[in-house]
Image (cartoon, helix red, strand yellow):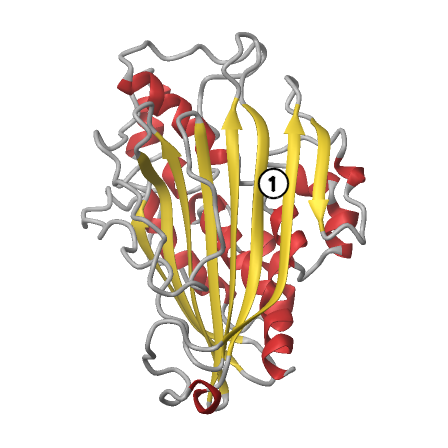
Amino acid sequence: MVAFDPVTTPSYDRAMPGPVMEPAPVRRPGSVRRTSHLDATRSQQPGFPGVMRIAGAARDVVTGSAESAGGPAAGGPEAAGPEAAVTGTAALHVGVDERGLIDVVEHEPANLSCQSLIGQRVGFGFRSGAKELLGSLSGSLLGLLVDDLSGAPSPSGYGAIRDRIVLGLPPLPPPPGRSSGPRADVCSGWRTSGLAFGLASAGEPLPFEAEPPIAPELSSEDPFGWHAMPTLHAGQSRRIRRLDVWFEGDHLLVDAMFRDSTCDPNETARVVHEYALTATLDADSQRILAIEAEPRALPFPTDCPFAADSVQLILGQPAAGLREAVRVLSAGAVSCTHLNDAMRCLADIPTLVGQLRA
């Protein structure tokens, strides 16, 4: 059960530790690592609000066993760069028109067409229109990128707000026909009893941190620690994911993280959302036995972090069914839409375990 009542619990009073300083830790012998990124580029044209392009890539890397790498037993520390084999890559680029609808799709691999995405709206609600395609791509790297078209544009909205604050410009009015008020209780950050919702409802500035944390570099001594990504520029936001899976006795262990960042007008990347996630699964049934989420950086520190305990709602669930189970089990003021996406990504574990066993 979640650890707070969204109606009566006061503001979160603990400090978050800030971004994971080592988002690509040394790979463990006998493990598989899946990484991905999607970059959203905002339009700078008058009359063209929102994102105009989303592009990114993903990669799977299997790291050799302790014996083949000459290192310690699986799960222990290892020198940077143990033996690695790239077992898959994918890339996706979509163009978005002024209505927020996809009008260009390019992707690799090309063996399954994603042209059915033409005309779909990116952002929240995207998955319902792309349900059939997502089913066909389930577990694949390309499927992960397509699935993330739902949430990847989100930090771009924060980036637009941040840009105007940095440049000393007044807030933009909402687009025609769209309310300026938040959706009540859509997540922990927007719970009706929370500070952010109260301020927004009163027309007051939102309680963002004055200086959101700077995003640490992803580079490391390990050439396979992360796949290649372009430099992030002003007017862009980025969502990254890392998922490490390995066997330890009768269990599967998981170490994961995600980060949303935006780029200031001076080219400084700052973190909007970040969680670190660890889990233990039964190796045979692949059911969740234990799971913890650590809030590292979130837009509303007074309310967003309460959602961390929502991960307990998926205890006992099989990994393969998490994309559907999370949607049903974790919703409303006890949840976080971005943390829900991180839990949904654990549905790819069976695919990654297949690569380990192969």
The kind of residue on which mark 1 rests is Leu
Depicted 179 relative to depicted 332: above or below = above
Where residue 25 sits: x, y (%)? Answer: 35, 66
Indicate the position of residue 97 as horizontal and vertical percent values. Answer: 66, 21
- Image quadrant in which the C terminus is located: bottom right
Question: On the picture, is 74 further left or further right than 64?
Answer: left
User: Residue 170: in sight, yes or no?
Assistant: yes
Q: Which of 110 and 1 is in front in this view?
A: 110
Residue at position x 66%, y 52% from top?
142
Residue at left 74%, top 47%? 131
**Total marks placed:** 1
Q: Label 1: state its secondary structure.
A: loop
The x and y percentages for residue 237 are 44, 34
Q: Nearer the viewer, residue 246 or 193?
A: 246
Identify the image quadrant of the N terminus. bottom left
Q: In this view, does 21 lie above or below 182?
A: below
**Residue at x 37% of width, y 22% of height:** 161
Residue 203 sits above or below residue 228 on the image: above
Crowding near the residue tagged with mark 1, few <14, some 14–19, many ≥20 C-alpha atoms within 10 Å: many
Q: Can residue 185 be seen in this view?
A: no
The percent position of residue 69, horizontal first and vertical second, equals 44, 85
Q: In which quarter of the image is residue 280?
A: bottom left
Instruction: Please name the residue that numbered disc 1 is placed on.
Output: 149
Of 77 and 315, nearer the camera is: 77
Q: Which residue is drawn at 25% across and 40% down?
A: 213
Q: Is residue 351 left or right of residue 211?
A: right
